[in-house]
Image (spheres, rainbow, N blue to C red):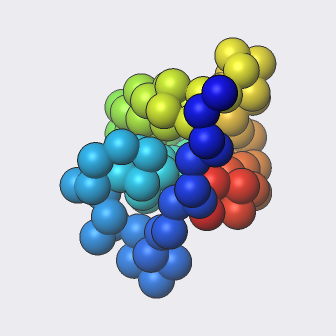
Amino acid sequence: MTAPEPPVATNEESPARDAAAPGLKGALARYRVLAYIVGVGLLALVGAMIMNYGFDQPQYSRIVGPVHGFLYVIYLVLTVDLGLKARWPIVRTGLILLAGMIPFVSFVAERRVTKELS
């Protein structure tokens, strides 16, 4: 029987500093950075969609949409990486993957994941 892994100490002030760290600590830091970026990007996309459909200004969604889509794909890869290193069940990993699709939920998921793994 193996001993449980010790908690991962993360840098709460600047998670980007830990992004190059190996193992679970680095995976968590990379996930945290992308969760914030994707969360803000999704809010920007919601604003762009309001401008598009509410005020007939489609130029914002033409810019924000592809950028958010690209960043979301990176978020997916980093979340799967974290899920593998943290040994999460596939359902849990899937729910955290979906968190990047609902406004504000990526922030909540990031806090819960950080609290659990720290």
Residue at the front extreme of this rendering: 1
Of 10 and 98, the residue lying toward us: 10
Q: Determine if residue 34 is in view.
A: no
Give the residue furthest to the left.
Answer: 20
Q: Position of residue 103 (x, y in %)?
A: 72, 49
Task: State the image coordinates of residue 48 (x, y, percent, origin top left).
Answer: 56, 49
Relative horizontal placement of residue 35, taking residue 49 as reference (left or right): left
Q: State the image quarter where residue 68 is shown.
A: top left
Q: Quadrant of residue 78?
A: top left
The residue sitting at 42% across, 54% down in the picture is: 25
Residue 71 placement: quadrant: top left
Q: Residue furthest top?
A: 90
Q: How many marks?
A: 0
State the image coordinates of residue 107 (x, y, percent, origin top left): 67, 58
Q: Residue at x 70, y 62 (%)?
A: 115
User: Looking at the picture, how far across and down is residue 74, in whole percent?
Assistant: 38, 33
Indicate the quadrant containing the N terminus: top left, top right, bottom left or bottom right: top right
Image point 27% across, 55% down: which residue?
21
Residue closer to the observer: 82 or 62: 82
Asked if residue 87 lies left or right of residue 20, the reply is right
Residue 77 seen from this side: yes
Give whichever of 109, 116 is nearer the camera: 116
Q: Is residue 60 above or below residue 2?
A: below
Q: Quadrant of the C terminus?
A: bottom right
